[in-house]
């Protein structure tokens, strides 16, 4: 069994931005994403732009969001090296989710009070299935608790081989007390959990 105590975590801030950059610059890992996809209501025009140009625009925009406190997430480290990432944030930090067909089609109770989202995981290929995503998720939930708590939503995949693995897997949320609220498209479910604020 993997020893999870070896990992450490940090919030993404202007100070840890260089670590986020190191993780997202790994060649061939994340394309142009920079974990900004759900943070924009609509994709910006990109006709005629190369992958490198789109990546650079996303990197720059993400950095500006982090600097102004509009982007949250947890970096997971092994011996000082960033190896994984869990993005979380309040509803307004991931407007693309509200804009999606799957989200608009949901027939669920609206959430009263603060709504948070766990919108993405990215784990270095060499570190997968070694507890990195779970470590990031636990730290994100602790952070939400410290920031006043509320309802936390997630959209994990229900089957192996599904495309959107960046949403995480059902078991990791179940283990942390999330309950399935509704199907979310064909391969995902909407899960929720109430996080009580820290005293
Ligand atoms: C999916 C992903 C986040 C899992 O991270 P991880 O650190 O390997 O996960 P963990 O080791 O913490 O395990 C989490 C759970 O999910 C399961 N799991 C891991 N990878 C899985 C997969 N591909 N499909 C289904 N289940 C998976 C694990 O078995 C574990 O469940 P268990 O407790 O029941 O055994 C990781 O594979 C990843 O980063 N994938 C790429 C996502 C991506 O493309 N992100 C960027 C988008 S631009």
Image (tube, rainbow, N blue to C red):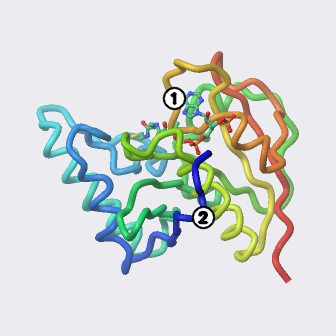
| Rendered image quadrant of residue 139 | bottom right
- Give the residue at x 33% y 67%: 19
The location of residue 74, given as percent across then percent down, is: 52, 63
94 vs 177, left or right, is left
Q: Quadrant of the C terminus?
A: bottom right
Q: Residue furthest front?
A: 1
| Rendered image quadrant of residue 100 | top right
The location of residue 162, given as percent across then percent down, is: 54, 20
Q: Quadrant of the N terminus?
A: top right
- Give the residue at x 79% y 45%: 192
Element on which disc 1 rests: loop
* Residue with the mark numbered 1: 164
- Give the residue at x 38% y 46%: 124
Element on which disc 2 rests: helix
| Rendered image quadrant of residue 50 | top left
Image position of 121 with respect to 105: above or below = below
* Circle 2 crowding by C-alpha within 10 Å: few under 14, some 14–19, many from 20: few
Image position of 34 with respect to 50: above or below = below
Q: Is mark 1 within 8 Å of ligand 1?
A: no
- Give the residue at x 74% y 56%: 115
* Residue with the mark numbered 2: 5
The location of residue 128, given as percent across then percent down, is: 47, 40
* Circle 1 crowding by C-alpha within 10 Å: few under 14, some 14–19, many from 20: some
194 vs 16, left or right, is right
Which sits earlier in the primary sequence, circle 1 or circle 2?
2
Distance Cα–Cα, label 1 vs label 2: 28 Å
The location of residue 37, given as percent across then percent down, is: 42, 44
């Amino acid at each position: 069994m993997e020893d999870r105590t070896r990992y450490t975590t940090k919030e993404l801030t202007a100070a840890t931005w260089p670590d986020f950059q190191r993780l997202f610059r790994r060649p061939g890992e994340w394309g142009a994403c920079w974990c900004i996809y759900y943070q924009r209501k609509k994709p910006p025009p990109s006709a005629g732009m190369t992958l490198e140009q789109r990546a650079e625009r996303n990197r720059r925009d993400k950095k500006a969001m982090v600097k102004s406190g509009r982007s949250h997430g947890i970096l997971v480290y092994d011996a000082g090296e960033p190896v994984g990432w869990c993005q979380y944030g309040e509803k307004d930090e991931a407007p693309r989710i509200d804009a999606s067909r799957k989200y608009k089609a949901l027939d669920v109770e609206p959430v009263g009070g603060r709504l948070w989202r766990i919108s993405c995981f990215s784990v270095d290929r060499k570190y997968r299935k070694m507890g990195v995503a779970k470590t990031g998720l636990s730290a994100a939930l602790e952070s939400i608790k410290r920031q006043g708590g509320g309802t936390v939503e997630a959209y994990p995949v229900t089957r192996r081989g599904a495309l959107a693995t960046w949403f995480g897997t059902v078991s990791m949320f179940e283990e942390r007390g999330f309950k399935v609220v509704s199907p979310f498209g064909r391969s995902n479910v909407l899960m929720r959990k109430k996080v009580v604020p820290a005293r």
